[in-house]
Every structure is written in structure tokens, then in C-alpha cells.
Amino acid sequence: MQRFDADQSGELSEQEFTTMMTALLDPASNLLDDQILHYQGLFQKADLDDSGTINVDELKKLLHIRRAIKNSLAIKI
């Protein structure tokens, strides 16, 4: 997370989060509008306290939930 925390605040802004998701998931991509909207939606879900930033705990919760959903879908298939 520190790598993408451009302002070194200890939290990620929406822009920093989008940059991180792009770099980690699709580094060669030119983001399409629907991808940006998807990442913005993820950010909004992760920002549990509506602070406009996400901290390490909020990011961990988001990743844990996403992993659980992915695993449950794989079991159904």
C-alpha cells in the first residue's frame, strides 16, 4: 500500500486506489470508463467511515470479502 500512497498519508485516496488496482491487476491497460467506475465503486465500498480515503484495515476487509466471494463462486462452478 505504501508504494501507491503518493502523499504518504498512510491512507489511499480514490485516485491512489485506482492507480494501485490498475497497476496490480492490469498494468498494461488503458482504463476504460467502466473499469474506472468499477474501481470507484470498490473504493466507495471499502471506505467504511466515509472519510474519502481508505486505510489498511478497510483495504484488508475489502480484499477479504472479494476473496470470499471469488472462492464461493468457484465452488458453485
Image (cartoon, rainbow, N blue to C red):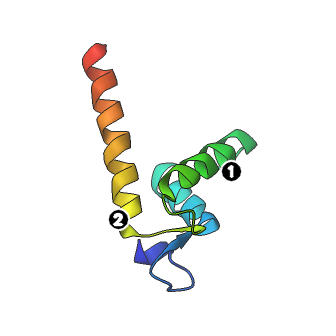
Q: Real-space Cα distance between discs 1 and 2?
A: 29 Å
Residue 49 visible at all: yes
Question: Local crowd at mark 2 within 10 Å, few (<14), some, or many (≥20)?
Answer: few
Total residue callouts: 2
Asked whether the beta carbons under mark 1 and mark 2 sit within 8 Å of each other, the answer is no
State which tag comes first along the sequence, 1 or 2.
1
What number is the disc on residue 10? Answer: none
Q: Nearer the viewer, mark 1 or mark 2?
A: 2
* Percent of width and height locating residue 56: 37, 68
In this view, the residue farthest toward the top is: 77
Q: Name the residue that disc number 2 marks.
A: 57
- Residue at (68%, 50%) from the top-left corner? 30
> In the rendered image of this protein, does residue 62 appear above or below residue 66?
below
Three-letter amino acid code of the residue under disc 2: Asp
Q: Name the residue that disc number 1 marks.
A: 30
Residue 28 visible at all: no
* Percent of width and height locating residue 39: 59, 49
Q: Taking 54 as reference, is 66 left or right? A: left
Question: Local crowd at mark 1 within 10 Å, few (<14), some, or many (≥20)?
Answer: few
